Every structure is written in C-alpha cells, then in structure tokens.
Image (spheres, rainbow, N blue to C red):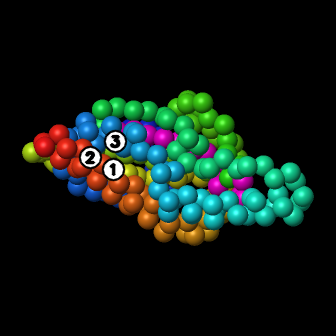
Amino acid sequence: MALIDRYIPNPKYREHHSATVKASAETVIAAAAAYQTESDPFFRRMITLRQLPMRAEAFFKRRPREALPPFGLDNFTLLERSESEIVFGLAGRFWRPDFDLAPLSGRHDFLDLNEPGIAKLAFNFAVRARGAGVTILSTETRVLCVDRAASVRFAPYWYLIRPVSGLIRRRTLIVIRRTCENDSERVLE
C-alpha cells in the first residue's frame, strides 16, 4: 500500500506523472526530498501569476503592501516519509485569492481536518527500483473536498490550474532525473 493511500485513498481529483531515472532508488528519493520547486523559473512565474488576485485585492483595498512570501514546498506539511515515498499535505480553500490555508502541524491534523468548505491535497514522490540501477520516480497529486460546497468551488479551479500543475510536476521529474543522472556520471568519472 502506498503511503499516500493513508491520507487520501479515494480522491475526487487526481494527477499522476512518472519518469525513468538511471540511478538507485536511494539516490532518487534523496534528490526528490531535496528538490525545491522555487528553483524552477517557470514555477516562480506561475506562482506570481497565481498570486496576482491577492496582490490586486490588497492594492484596491489600499492595504499596506506586504511582501508576499513565495509559495512553494515550504507551505506543505510533511505527512510521512519512508525509504520509497514522501507524502506532503496542504489544506485550504485554494480557489480563494489568498489560498486560505488551514494550519497543519502534522499527519494527525491533516487526517482529522473536516472543516466545512475545505479541500485537502496530498502529493507524493515515490520510487520503485526497476533493476540494474534504474528507478521509476513518480509523483501523484490527490485532492479530496470535505463537502459538496468545497467540491463545487474547487472544480473550476482544478480544471484551470491542472494543466499548469501537470507541467510543473513533469518539469520537477526532469530536474530530479537530470540531477541524479549527472551525479551518477560524476561518480563514475
């Protein structure tokens, strides 16, 4: 059983991507754990675009302009980690300009959260050795809306952001693969 199944076993929304990496499973999961989404210029541009409604709202309401911290993996809570999988969680009303994130301190907060109007998102990196120094690296995003109201609000948001999210995930896999394979080549030299 995959760890992510413990957190969102029957998602309404799901996205899965994978890549073959010429490196050991241990090397690949370590690289996935160390990856920072903020290092991708495309990710940074898309998050800046996503945060425009929040910036506009602050401007028109004449609120003091605060520097918005960049959204990234630091916003997610590590839910669980094993030798072959890392699971992160996030909960909130993602369709709102400010994401309206629910505070999570760990797996129990994530599992126990049933506040009306909330969507819970889990995503993972998982590795599976394929033999002879080859590993399959995958990432899956799963979303569960706590109630119908959240589902009605989340659906249009999902269909709008899903293509960009998928592209970001595929780019992430490529960077992790290159990192692992370049490191493997350096060891052989």
The residue at the point 51 percent across, 51 percent down is 38
Sequence-wise, the earlier of marks 1 and 3 is: 3
User: Could you say which quadrant of the image residue 60 lies in?
Assistant: bottom right
Sequence-wise, the earlier of marks 3 and 2 is: 3
Front in this rendered view, residue 152 or 158: 158
Under mark 3, the amino acid is Ala
Classify residue 151 as left or right of residue 124. right
Indicate the secondary structure of the residue bearing disc 2: helix
Front in this rendered view, residue 34 or 105: 34
The residue that mark 2 highlights is 180
C-alpha gap between disc 2 and disc 1: 6 Å
C-alpha gap between disc 1 and disc 3: 6 Å
CB of mark 2 within 8 Å of CB of mark 1?
yes
The residue at the point 63 percent across, 61 percent down is 48
How many numbered callouts? Answer: 3
Q: Residue 160: give x, y in percent of width and height.
A: 57, 70
Classify residue 168 as left or right of residue 72. left
Under mark 2, the amino acid is Cys
Name the outermost residue toward the front: 189
The residue that mark 1 highlights is 176
Q: Residue 157: give x, y in percent of width and height.
A: 61, 65
Q: What's drawn in magenta, residue-wise? A: 85-98
185 relative to 79, above or below = below
CB of mark 1 within 8 Å of CB of mark 3?
yes
| Residue 149 showing in the rendered view | no
Front in this rendered view, residue 90 or 41: 41
108 relative to 183, above or below = above
CB of mark 3 within 8 Å of CB of mark 2?
yes
